[in-house]
Image (tube, rainbow, N blue to C red):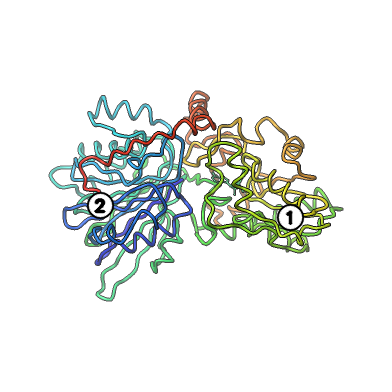
Amino acid sequence: MCGIIGIVANSPVNQLLFDGLTLLQHRGQDAAGILTCEDQRLFLRKENGLVKDVFHTRHMRQLFGNMGIGHVRYPTAGCDSSAEAQPFYVNAPFGIALGHNGNLTNVDELRASVKQTDHRHINTNSDSEVLLNVFAHELAATAGDEPAVEDVFAAISGVHRRVKGAYAVIGLIAGRGIFAFRDPSGIRPVCFGQRQTESGFTEYMIASESVAIEASDFELIRDLAPGEAIFITTDGQVSLKQCAEHAQYTPCIFEYVYLARPDSIIDDVSVYRARMRMGERLAAKIMREWPDHDIDVVIPIPDTSRTAALEIAVSMNLKYREGFVKNRYIARTFIMPGQAQRKRSVRQKLNAIDLEFRGKNVLLVDDSIVRGTTSSEIIRMAREAGANKVYLASAAPPVRYPNVYGIDMPAATEFVAHDRNVEEIRAAIGADYLIYQDLDDLIESVRVGNPSLKAFDCSCFTGEYVTGDVDQAYLDGVADKRNDKAKSDSGRSRDIVAVGLYNVQ
Ligand code: AMP
């Protein structure tokens, strides 16, 4: 998972891009990049680190121009070099830069065809660089001396024909404009908004999530549809086109469970309201299955589960208490290589307030249970804080299958729910009672916000992959890259800066 942003304005965009990326920081903390354009010149700064650490005043001063794109990268296995920070750049044709959120499922085949048929060079392991080169090849094949809007759309149609998987893309063509598109299944989100300057120029922002648009004082217009593309010229002319032959709307349901900020609206569904409904439906299930429960208090495992936990408490007429305090200066635990390090990190991140636990039967609520490391450590902490009984509710169903569409999840065998039923998971994490959301309830929690959404990508719960091209051999390859050993072996850094483009120092 990553965050993308693009802006066309009539004053410098460097600060707006920086602020927008900061609003998307939750989508990726591994690396950040901004590329701006003034006339025909491009300016790039990208590096590993948080937005606030990558861009210093001296970098910002050199990111000239009224048009630009930005990216925050989420760490995935084998992707640890700053050369793989985005946006990527190719000089031919026309000077193109691109950033991508998602994961391509036919990347090996694409890598081969880019080399052997398109005769283009790929310098990193990143699938986004492959995607950029496919787009560049397609644009070179359609455009004449100048890339017209229709050429850009034809190139995007070419990308849709060749590329499989999840891709929400932001791109820039030097001196011409910015473009964005969404894969034909609409798995990862992209939306756009506008605002009027005093001089009457309409400025545009494209972003992964509406929070970046609204908090930057732009007005949200809408999401891109699956397969749809947008092109905005430097002078603010907007064109939209459906570029996919067979588009289907199957957005990733995990965006609503965990990935997105609650104050975002994705595909016309408020993430916050969806999480509230997850809480209501889970409460109804608890009351159905355990009418004579003895829960004294509901306690969220911060931060994401708060919204659902509060609704569980309200629906069940129970007390809601913040029993854990989070140290917000600790890095996320999930991607840390090695189980011991992960456990230690949970302890550093969360601390229990004993008086909320002592002598009580507590219902802890998490948004999802993946490895189970967080859950088992937290259950232990709740007991140490004096809890009588420790129950756990998960706002999502058991995560059992790898995500191949851009969420870094462990190898399937590392999921606590792998080959275990609910009772076995309960025993493994040491809870006195465990309840999961049903998938139908999760889907309805989101769908109520936009009934026109008929289906979602729920692959991490069902093992059914909406793009239809994911087979066991592919999943075995994913498992090899994602297990703890592979992650600890991939610490090698190859810092080669993007070829041919001035990287602002
Ligand atoms: P665990 O069960 O220990 O693997 O951790 C589950 C917790 O990690 C949940 O509370 C989620 O908030 C969070 N989580 C779920 N998926 C991811 C992910 N792909 N990356 C980082 N954190 C995640």
Q: How many marks?
A: 2
The vertical placement of 103 against 477, above or below, is below
* Marks 1, 2: nearer the viewer: 2
Q: Nearer the viewer, residue 436 or 389?
A: 389
**Left or right of 494: which side holds 292?**
right
> Whereabouts is ligand 1, in terms of quadrant?
top right
Q: Nearer the viewer, residue 48 or 475?
A: 48
Q: CA distance from mark 1 to mark 2?
A: 52 Å
Name the spot of residue 49 as percent of width and height, x first.
40, 50
In the displayed orientation, state which residue is furthest to the bottom: 198
Report helix, strand or loop for mark 2. Answer: loop
Residue 56 sits in quarter: bottom left
Q: Nearer the viewer, residue 33 or 440?
A: 33
Report helix, strand or loop for mark 1. Answer: helix
The residue labelled by disc 1 is 283
Which residue is drawn at the image coordinates 25% and 48% (left, top)?
503
Looking at numbered disc 2 in the image, what kind of residue is underneath it?
Val
**Left or right of 263: which side holds 492?**
left
The vertical placement of 437 against 296, above or below, is above
Assess mark 2: CB under 8 A from ligand 1?
no
Assess mark 1: CB under 8 A from ligand 1?
no
Name the spot of residue 243 as percent of width and height, x first.
34, 44
Name the spot of residue 414 as percent of width and height, x first.
61, 33
The residue labelled by disc 2 is 504
Q: Which mark is residue 423?
A: none
**Left or right of 196: which side holds 289?**
right
Residue 238 sits in quarter: bottom left
